[in-house]
Image (spheres, rainbow, N blue to C red):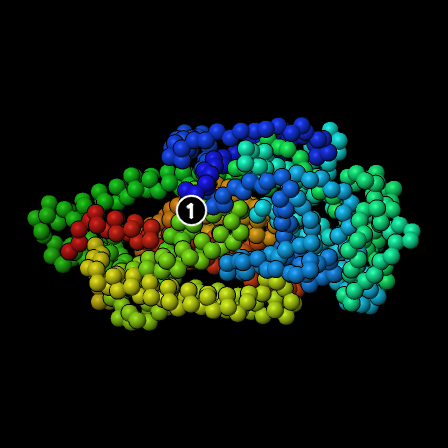
Amino acid sequence: LGGVEVIIVSLRPSFALCDGAPPIRRRQKRSQLHERKRPMARNLLRCLAAASAAAGVSGFYLPGIAPHDYAPGERVWLKVNSLTSSKTQVPYEYYKFNFCKPKRIIDNKENFAEFMAGDRIQNSPYQVFTMEDTYCNLLCAVKTGSEKGHKYKQMKALVEDAYHHNWLMDSLPAASVADAEEGGLASYAKGVPVGYVGPTGKVFVYNHVQLIVKYHETDAGARIVGLYAEPYSVRHKFAAGVDYAYGPSGRKVNKDLGAAAIKTCTGYPMTKTDATFAGPQELTPDAQIIYTYDVVWEPSEVAWASRWDIYLNTGDQTVENVHWFSIVNAVIIVLTLGAILAVILARSLRADLTRYNKEELAPLAGGGGGGGGDDGGDDLDETGWKVVHADVYRPPHYPGFLCALVATGAQLGVMAFLVLLFAYVGFVSPANRGSLLLALLATYALVGGVAGYVCARLYKALGGQRWTATTAATATLFPLTCGVVFGALEAALVAAGSSSAVPPLVLLQLAGLFAFVVVPLTYLGAAAGFAAPTAEFPATPAKVARPVPPQPATLSLPVAALVCGVVPFGASFVELYFVLDSLWMEAYYYLFGFAACGFALLVLAAAETAALLTYYSLCAENHRWWWRAFLAPAAAGAYVLAYAAFYYDAHLAGDGSTALAFCLFFGYMTLVALAVALVSGAAGFLASLKFTNYIFSQIKFD
C-alpha cells in the first residue's frame, strides 16, 4: 500500500502521550529506535483480529499519508492556515493581517472540501531545520500603526475575539502549550493564540513562540511525531546602536540582524521567568512589535502512527465514561422499546388475531342463520385495527411529496451509514483535512439512486401518476434547500471578507456534482423502481372512505410528535454534544464507532416509536397513519435544533458573539436538524409500513 501504515484506534482513549509523557522542558537522551518490518498482509490480519476481539467498540484507520523521514539539516516547512476563532466562527486568511510574511507567498494545493471548510494553507518565513536547535530567531518587526489605523484595529480585534494561529508541520497541526510546569503534565489546546486581554482590559500580543518539535528517530532519519508551540508575550527591544529599517508595508527589511541585535534575548530557550522579567508586549498605537521564535527538537518514543493521540485524547477519564454512558443509555432505551413492541406482537396482536378469527367462524357455527341482521350485528361488534382494513392502504394526501421526503431520508440514512463506516475503518481521519466533508458530498451524490428507487417503488404502490414531478422533487428537494441556506451564508461571508467564502470555481464544481451526478443517478434509480413489479398491499381500499372517530388527546399529532421525537433524540443526544464541539469549538472528533452506534440507535428508536404509534392509531380506528408515521419521529429534528440553541447559549453566546456567527450557527444547524428529521421520519415511516403489512397479512378479508 505504498507505506501506508495500519493503525488501531480504540474508542477507549489510551492517553499514552498525556499520562506517560515527560514534561515539556525535560530533555531526553537521543536513542536509536529501530522499526520492525512486517509484511503488510500480516499487519492487516492482526489489525482485523484485534478489532474483532476488542471488548469495547474499536476500529482501525488508514491515515492516507506516508511517513516522511527527514535527514539531519533538512529544512522542514512550517505552513500557516487560516486564523480561526470559536467566538466568531469566521476564519480569515493569515496574511490579510499585519504578520510576518515570506518573500513570496505560495498557496498550498487544496481540494474543494478544504476550501469549503475555510482552509487556506500557505508558506511561512519560519526557518526550521531537522535536529537543529536555534534560539531567539528574529522573524520580523512590524509597526502597529496609528490608533485609528486599519492595522492597529485589526490586530486588536483579533486578540479580543480570541483568534488563533493554525500552523502545520509535516501535515501535523501545532498544539499550544497552555501549562508546562516543571515536573507536571502539560495541557494542550488546538492552535496558538494571537494574544490575550489582561485583567485591566489591556491587549497583549504573543510575539515569541517556542516551537517544540518531537521526532521519532529511524534508520532513514527523523519522523515528526509532535509539534507544540509555547507562546510568550515579551517586550523585545533592539540593542543600542542597531540600525533597522522598515519597508513600505511597515515590516522590517534588515537581513543581517540576528539574536544578538535583540537585548532581551538570552541565548537559550525562552522561559516564563525571562518573559516576566522583560515584561509583556502590549499592543499600543505607533509602536513596534518584534517577532521571534525558538526551535527545540526533542526525541520521542511515540511512533509516527500514534502522533495524533495528543489531539484525539483529552486525558480525562470522565470523557470516556460519558461516551459509554451515552451508548448504554441509548441501548437501554432501544431495548425497552423493542421489548414493548415484542409484547404487542406476542400478546396483544396474537389476542387480536384470535378474536378476529373466532368472529369469522361464528356465522359458520350458527348455521348461517340471522341473514342481514346478523351480518350487521357482526359489523357493529367489530372494533380495533381490523375494522379499518378497507381504508388502511388508502393513499394519503400529497403522496408524491411524502414519497420524496421518505426517499430523501433513506438517501441521507444510507449516506450517513457509509460515511461512518468509512470513518470507522480509517478512510476519514483528521490527518486528511476536508476528508469528512468530501466523503459526505461524494457519498450523497453516489447514493442518489437509492432515493430514486425508494421513491419510485413507494409512489407506484400508491398509484401515483406524476412520476416525473415526483422524481424531480426527490432529486432537488434537499439539495436546493441546502443551496439556498448556503448561498445566503456565503454572501454574508463574502461581505465579511472571510477565508471560508467559497471561490467561484468550487461553486461550479458543486453545481456540476449536483447536475451531472445526483440528478442522473436519482432518475436512474427511479427508472429501476418503476420498472420493478408493483408492491402489493394485503388489503384493497374501499371506494368510500370510512370516517375517523374522535381520537384521544394522547394520540393527537402534537402529543405524538413530542413523545416520538424525544425518544430517538434521547438515544443520541449525549454523543451530539461531542459532535457539536467538533463543529463549533475547534475540537477533533474521532470516535466514529460511538457515532455509528448512536446513529444506529437513533434509527432503531425512530422505527420502534413510529410502529407503536401506528398500532395504537389503528386500534383507535384512525386509518390516516401515513403522514403521522413520518412526522411524529421526524420531530427528533426539532429536538436537535432546540438542543443546538441551548448549546449556543451555553458555549457560544456572549459579549463577543456577532450576528454573522449567530446566522452561521443556526443556518447550518437548521440543515443538520432537517437531515435528522428526514432520516428519523423515513425510518419511522418504513417501519410502520412494514408493521402494517405484517399485521394485515395475518388475517383474511371478505
Q: Can residue 367 be seen in this view?
A: yes
Q: Foreground residue, 260 or 351?
A: 260
Q: Which residue appears at 70% of the width and 35% of the height?
A: 24
Residue 476 image position (x, y, % from top left)? 40, 67
Q: Which residue appears at 13% of the width and 49% of the height?
A: 363
Of the 4 image quadrants, the one containing the C terminus is bottom left
Position of residue 464 relative to residue 432, above or below, is below
Q: Foreground residue, 269 or 696?
A: 269
Q: Left of 453 or right of it: where is 652?
A: right
Q: Which residue appears at 24% of the width and 51% of the height?
A: 696
Q: Foreground residue, 2 or 397?
A: 2
Residue 641 image position (x, y, % from top left)? 54, 56
Badge count: 1
Q: Left of 355 or right of it: where is 119?
A: right
Position of residue 357 relative to residue 505, above or below, is above
Q: Left of 357 or right of it: where is 62?
A: right
Q: Foreground residue, 101 or 449?
A: 101
Q: Residues within 10 Å of mark 1 (few under 14, many from 20)?
A: some
Residue 452 image position (x, y, % from top left)? 32, 62
Judging by the rendered image, the residue that carries numbered circle 1 is 422
The amino acid at mark 1 is: Phe
Position of residue 334 relative to residue 455, above or below, is above
Residue 487 image position (x, y, % from top left)? 53, 69
Which residue appears farthest toward the left when viewing the image?
Answer: 367
Q: Is residue 460 visible?
A: no
Element carrying mark 1: helix
Of the 4 image quadrants, the one containing the N terminus is top left
Q: Which residue appears at 41% of the width and 66% of the height?
A: 514
